[in-house]
Amino acid sequence: MNSNKTILTGDRPTGPLHIGHYVGSLKKRVELQHAYRQYVLIADMQALTDNAGNPKKVRDNVLEVALDYLAVGLDPALNVIVVQSLVPELAELTMYYLNIVTLARLKRNPTVKDEMKQKGFGEDVPAGFLTYPVSQAADITAFRARYVPVGQDQLPMIEQTNEIVDKFNSLYGGEALLRCEPLLSAVTRLPGTDGQGKMGKSTDNAVFLKDDEDTLRRKIRQMYTDPLHLKASDPGHVDGNPVFAYLDAFDPDKAGLEELKEHYKKGGLGDVKVKERLFEALNRELASIRARRREFEKDPAEVLNMLKKGSLKAREITSVTLGAVRAALLLDY
Ligand code: TRP
């Protein structure tokens, strides 16, 4: 039996975290922190791979993301919260791994392919962006993580990591690196408030954890619903209607919600009513998160200090991995 219960999870600091992150991963992390050794990585170097011209954005969002973590209840005493760039072993490992990954393989990574299309990079893709899965493999292996909680879109990263692990171990005849497994989340992704695909950090279709009550009310009021439900008396669609997707995620009264859906489908229930119910449910959950955030916001220097401590702690394990890798490569001078 493998008794390694180490988890690595993380986010790119390119924007504050939203309620999609909350139901998709943050809630799960808060549970996992009690049963696992959990490293939570704020991947600032990865964020820079497509934000080279915008270091201020990345820097500011490192603090935002850290505050979001603390606000939802990730406890620095139970987790190691790490800033990627403060752990230099990760960059060094990336350099070594790049030699055993081909350009053709990098171009085949479906997630990177999608992102490149979205961002319109074409051949002018920053080399760092194309190779970020290798840097992510460095993250995962450096922490000797067995489990990586992911959504579907991150599965190719796990696959590519394990390829690197296998190739490295077989080339250099050792067991320097450990394979990892995805912990797939059962939760489906929340759609954006505009009903157009998933919620994004950088698009304006997100409800952020830090949004105040007025912002929340406005965003919900403007939410896309069923375009065929023009009058309250019209029968409405629940499927594909983001208001109901959010209610499914946040309304604790499941029986009441079922009645509401039936009423909406039959006709006679206006969007305003449904949105009021959503506001109540969501605001109840976000209120405590906001309150906790406000406490931590009072002392950003202390939050930064916590990040530095976590990053230093992280180096205890990443330096062991780097030592093994350097030895395997005959670089143990
Ligand atoms: N790629 C992840 C994201 O876009 C962030 C990340 C970087 C990560 N390194 C990681 C996640 C290691 C899990 C493990 O959100």
Image (spheres, grey):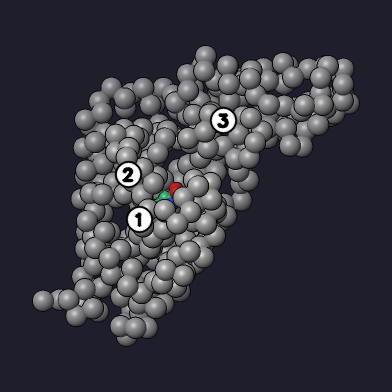
Callout 3–callout 2 Cβ contact below 8 Å: no
Report x, y in % for residue 115. Answer: 51, 50
Number of the label disc, if any, that sits on residue 205: 3
What residue is shown with label 2? 52
**The quadrant where residue 217 appears:** top right
Residue 317 in view of the camera: no
- Quick one: label 2 or label 1, which is nearer the N terminus? 2
Judged from the image, the secondary structure of the residue bearing numbered disc 1 is helix
What residue is shown with label 1? 128
Q: Residue at x 56, y 37 (%)?
A: 199
In the foreground, 310 or 161: 161
Q: Amino acid at mark 2?
A: Ala
Callout 2–callout 1 Cβ contact below 8 Å: yes
Q: Is mark 3 within 8 Å of ligand 1?
A: no
Report x, y in % for residue 282. Answer: 58, 25
Judged from the image, the secondary structure of the residue bearing numbered disc 3 is loop
Quick check: 322 above or below 73? below
Q: Is mark 2 within 8 Å of ligand 1?
A: no
Q: Amino acid at mark 3?
A: Asn
Report x, y in % for residue 114. Answer: 54, 53
Residue 53 in view of the camera: yes
In the foreground, 60 or 120: 120
In the foreground, 11 or 258: 11
Instruction: Report the side of 76 relative to 301 (left or right).
Output: right
- As measured in the structure, the alpha-carbon distance from the residue carrying label 1 to the one carrying label 3 is 28 Å
**The quadrant where residue 262 appears:** top right
Q: Nearer the viewer, mark 3 or mark 2?
A: 2
Judged from the image, the secondary structure of the residue bearing numbered disc 2 is loop
Q: Residue at x 87, y 25 (%)?
A: 235
